[in-house]
Image (spheres, helix red, strand yellow):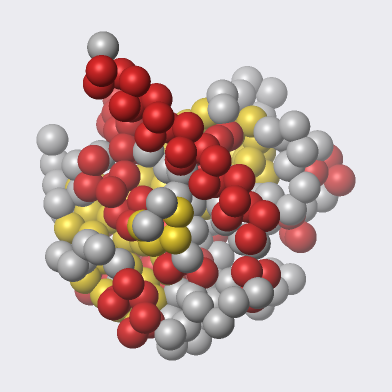
């Protein structure tokens, strides 16, 4: 298999956490949120991992238990596309790149392996990790045509009424063919309600080149659940404790 790298976005402050700490260093079972994402990437086969850091980045660097990751600084928060662009030197030209978030501690190596297998088997240039949810409010939507083919990903704020009817959400996690990701990053523009550089705009750029863009939909959205406030942190902790107990029970058999 070709080489795999991972870029984990971990620059945000996380104001809804009501804490002075960067969001990604809040802990569950003694481990930082971002450590869980790093472990999932490693478990999926990522040989090199880069954290895009920003707010109080020194604390992030000191707090994580994985010391073999690389860091790049995103000084201004100008969107997900800008964050990944900050890691452009790290990307190189070969193989594939996973894009993950530092505040999604429930993502698993297993899910990322399946995402990569689907990406390679389908001959995709980029594959979005998506999920079907009952209430998609606030999430970017995956739009498909009548035959179920991927058309685009659109942010909630920029979506039409018809597009908002989609219950398939963009998790913000992707696997890209690295060379095409690098080229597309240079072409994104802040033409949106937020005036930010959106990573999903690379999907349209890649698709317009005639290359294959697809979404790999999870039946259960648990793995892609993010942590934005203390309530969600507590809910994620319940899931992680349940998984730890399940693994212990499996090992005892």
Q: Residue at x 64, y 31 (%)?
A: 132
Q: Percent x, y for residue 215?
A: 50, 35
Q: Percent x, y for residue 11?
A: 45, 74
Q: Percent x, y for residue 190?
A: 60, 74
Query: For residue 251, which quarter of the picture?
Result: top left
The C terminus lies in quadrant? top left
Please determine whether, in this image, residue 61 is positioned above or below residue 37. Answer: below
Q: Residue furthest right?
A: 161
* Observer able to see residue 252: yes
The image shows a total of numbered marks equal to 0
Q: Percent x, y for residue 68?
A: 15, 65
Query: For residue 52, which quarter of the picture?
Result: bottom left
Left or right: residue 251 compared with residue 169: left
Please determine whether, in this image, residue 61 is positioned above or below residue 148. Answer: below
Q: Residue furthest top?
A: 253
Foreground pick, 6 / 55: 55
Please determine whether, in this image, residue 224 is positioned above or below residue 178. Answer: above
Left or right: residue 238 compared with residue 146: left
Left or right: residue 224 compared with residue 243: right
Foreground pick, 68 / 121: 68
* Observer able to see residue 213: no
The N terminus lies in quadrant? top left
Q: Residue at x 47, y 32 (%)?
A: 242
Please determine whether, in this image, residue 236 is positioned above or below residue 246. Answer: below
Q: Residue at x 21, y 70 (%)?
A: 70
Q: Residue at x 67, y 55 (%)?
A: 231
Foreground pick, 40 / 128: 40
């Amino acid at each position: 298999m070709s080489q795999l790298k991972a870029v984990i976005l971990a620059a945000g402050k996380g104001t809804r956490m009501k804490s002075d700490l960067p969001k990604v260093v809040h802990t569950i079972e003694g481990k930082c949120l971002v450590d869980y994402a790093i472990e999932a990437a490693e478990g999926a086969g990522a040989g090199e991992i880069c954290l895009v850091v920003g707010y109080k980045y020194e604390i992030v660097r000191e707090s994580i238990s994985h010391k073999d990751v690389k860091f790049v600084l995103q000084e201004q928060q100008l969107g997900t596309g800008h964050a990944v662009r900050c890691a452009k030197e790290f990307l190189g030209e070969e193989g594939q790149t996973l894009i993950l978030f530092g505040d999604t501690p429930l993502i698993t190596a297993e899910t990322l392996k399946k995402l990569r297998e689907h990406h390679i088997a389908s001959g995709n240039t980029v594959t979005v990790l998506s999920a079907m949810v009952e209430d998609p409010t606030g999430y970017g939507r995956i739009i498909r045509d009548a035959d179920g083919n991927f058309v685009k990903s659109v942010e909630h704020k920029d979506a039409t009424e018809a597009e908002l009817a989609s219950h398939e959400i963009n998790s913000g996690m992707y696997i890209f063919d690295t060379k095409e990701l690098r080229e597309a990053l240079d072409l994104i523009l802040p033409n949106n309600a937020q005036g930010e550089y959106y990573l999903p705009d690379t999907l349209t750029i890649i698709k317009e080149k005639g290359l294959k863009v697809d979404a790999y939909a999870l039946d259960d959205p648990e793995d892609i659940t993010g942590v934005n406030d203390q309530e969600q942190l507590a809910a994620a902790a319940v899931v992680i404790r349940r998984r730890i107990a399940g693994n212990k029970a499996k090992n005892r058999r």
